[in-house]
Image (cartoon, rainbow, N blue to C red):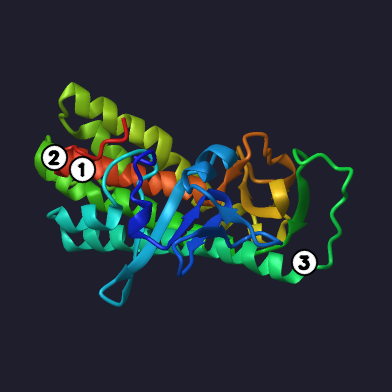
Amino acid sequence: MTKNFPWEQFDKVTFERGICIRRNETGDWFYINSENPLSVSDPNTVLTNFGVRPVLAEGSNQNNRVSFLLPAIRGRLLEIYRSELELLKPLKYVMGSMLYHCSALARLYAEECTTFVEQTTGKMVSDSNTSSEKEDTLVTRAEAPFYEFETLITKIVLGYEYIRYPIWRKYKSSKETPRNFSDVIKKCKFPPAIEKRIILSKENCYLPAKKFRHCIQHNQDIGSSSWCMFEKKYQLLWLFRARLPDNPEEKSANAFKFDQELDALTVAWEYVSEFFALTDILLGKGSLSST
């Protein structure tokens, strides 16, 4: 999907870690989050140089600004895909909310990087003897990314609860709809391939999302912790990460581990993409499957 990305259709693209590139009046691309002006000869090099994927693409259409959230694996632009599905209003609403908050989180990452660069330009002296491969890291107590992440992760969990109604009508084994998504899986009569796919989604998305939501809302005041950081890479380009614990089920902040280097934007974006893929498999044509 990214190999043949239609860069010419957009003038601003935000990647994971807050990397953002914009196209100027002459059609040339440049990084927004760099201390010095830094051009991008080929947008595809962003993917290979930094190991990140494009998350949000923005452009103009008949003098109106348009934006599209990309799928994390493959498939159509998620806004367009949602418009093509015939869904119950509550489910379509919550999917729209996922798109809105995931796009907002991506923009927030880019804004964090841009603001940081503007505040530090001229104040930080680069060490000429330092290898260009070295990363400088600065911890920050940013709270806003977790505000968006909490809302987004809550909508993802809600989406799984909403989708149980159309699933039950299609695969039910009794009249009464189960109280939650997990019970639907236990009581429905699925074809083997569908059952395998829906269990994978439960284990890899639904249950982890619930753990992160519970961690934020009940166990840990994330905003008070130094979980966010800026990292400087090649040629004074700054990246952002809002870290998530590997084990959010722990009730003590002292027990949290961060060995997997989980990032809030990446995790939430992948969950949104997975929910859209599962919805397509269960209620659509299955053309957006992430497997």
Estimate the x, y position of residue 164 in percent, counting from the top left: 23, 46
Q: Residue at x 27, y 58 (%)?
A: 79
- Amino acid residing under circle 2: Lys
- Amino acid residing under circle 1: Asp
Q: Does residue 162 appear in the picture of this structure?
A: yes
Give how far apart the Cα atoms at labels 1 and 2 are.
6 Å
Closer to the camera in the image, 25 or 7: 25
Which residue is identified by label 2? 285
Q: Residue at x 63, y 41 (%)?
A: 250
Which residue is identified by label 3? 120
Closer to the camera in the image, 238 or 23: 23
Mark 3 secondary-structure assignment: helix
Mark 1 secondary-structure assignment: helix
Which residue is identified by label 1? 280
Estimate the x, y position of residue 283 in percent, counting from the top left: 15, 44
Q: Residue at x 62, y 43 (%)?
A: 245
- Amino acid residing under circle 3: Thr
Q: Does residue 210 appear in the picture of this structure?
A: no
Closer to the camera in the image, 140 or 51: 51
Callouts 2 and 3 close, C-beta under 8 Å: no
- Of label 1 and label 3, which has the lower sequence position? 3
For disc 2, the neighbor class at 10 Å (few under 14, some 14 to 19, many from 20) is few
